[in-house]
Image (cartoon, rainbow, N blue to C red):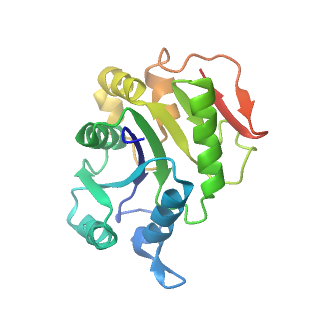
Amino acid sequence: MTDTWVIIQARMESSRLPYKAMLDIQGKPMIQHVIERCQAAGVGNVMVATSQCKADLTIKKRCDKLGVSTFMGDEDNVLHRFYKAAIRVKAEHVIRVTADCPMIDPKIIKDTVGYYWHETPDYCASRMDPNAFPDGMDVEIFTFAALKEAYEQADPTVLARFHDACTMVEIAISQVQDVLRADDAQSFDGAVEGQV
């Protein structure tokens, strides 16, 4: 699966909890727990997408130490950062996880990706239904084509307001409704849901 990449969204300048990506949890920074859990899922290569902000060099240094690829892009425009990171590694399938989910379950990642491969939607997420899993178990997977279309068609004045809490599905639904066709959600393995 060399064209499938887990891209972990991370930055230090969080307004609610600054420097959270590097907060120590049982002797490891939060970002390392997330990386290791994504690697344990075994669904693709792992990269961390952070910003060009000076503070985020700390994240890059940790990733370098762990042998994990990094991409440093736009601090505020997360869609731009993801799009450029995906281009860098020639990803055809992008799995999005955020660095503030240190308890993300590798099985949920694997099941979400399993649904995606089985049903081949443009977009799939573990929490299309917010009641499916508790917060912190969020994983999304989408085609590069859907990401590219969202990037090219989204209003740049709106994109300037996006931050880490915004998801690919929110971007696509609000800006590019034809990327995510609103068919009925289907389930895979009893809980994971997606849209075609």
Residue at the limit of the structure toward the front, as seen here: 1
Is 26 positioned to the left or the right of 171 in the image?
right
Q: How many marks?
A: 0
Is 117 on the left-hand or right-hand side of 17?
A: right
Q: Tell me if I can see residue 165 in this picture.
A: no
Foreground pick, 102 / 175: 102
> Residue at (34%, 34%) from the top-left corner?
159
Residue 101 location, quadrant: bottom right
Residue 65 appears in the picture as rendered: yes
Q: Is residue 158 above or below residue 13?
A: above
Q: Is residue 16 above or below residue 121?
A: below
Instruction: Pinpoint residue 113: horizontal percent, then vertical percent.
Output: 57, 40
Could you tell me which quadrant the C terminus lies in?
top right
* Rendered location of residue 5, percent (x, y): 40, 44
Q: Please, is residue 125 above or below residue 58 in the view?
A: above
Q: Position of residue 188 (x, y in %)?
A: 72, 34
Task: Tell whether 73 sits left or right of 148.
Answer: left
